[in-house]
Image (cartoon, grey):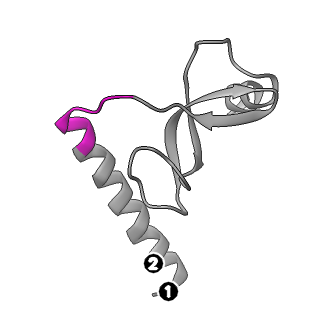
Amino acid sequence: MCDHIHDWFYGNKTGDVISMAVISDGNPYGVSEGLMFSFPCECINGEWKIVKGYKLDEFSRQKLKETEVELLDERKMALGY
């Protein structure tokens, strides 16, 4: 957690990509909006952005979808509908 906050606040090295759980709104990987989801990110001047352009193989795409479904189910349960 400390490394996560450090990279967000101070930034990561240019060209480095870090994994961060961020809001999924507007992501380029097809994950439903409104979820906290781990994406490849870069942080500069206290701002994070999701890194685009990673090619996902079928295994990765399947795992991404499974995680998304789990999070959507958990949100549904937590909100009682």
Q: State yes or no: discs 2 and 1 in contact (Cβ < 8 Å).
A: yes
> Which residue is rendered at x = 35% and y = 52% of the image?
67
Query: Callout 2 environment at 10 Å: few (<14), some (14 to 19), or many (20+)?
Result: few
Does residue 69 appear left or right of residue 47 in this picture?
left
x%, y% of residue 45? Answer: 81, 27
The quarter in which the N terminus is drawn is top right
Check residue 44 in the rendering and tell me which mark sits there, or answer none.
none
Q: Which quarter of the figure has residue 4?
A: top right
Determine whether the residue tagged by mark 1 lies in a helix, strand or loop.
loop
x%, y% of residue 78? Answer: 52, 76
Check residue 80 in the rendering and tell me which mark sits there, or answer none.
1
x%, y% of residue 72? Answer: 41, 67
Q: Amino acid at mark 1?
A: Gly
Position of residue 9 relative to residue 76, above or below, is: above
Question: How far, Cα to Cα, is label 2 from label 1?
Answer: 5 Å
Residue lying farthest to the bottom in this orientation: 81
**Where does the magenta region start and end?**
54-61
Position of residue 60 relative to residue 18, above or below, is: below
Determine whether the residue tagged by mark 2 lies in a helix, strand or loop.
helix
> Which residue is rendered at x = 41% and y = 29% of the image?
53
Q: Amino acid at mark 2?
A: Met
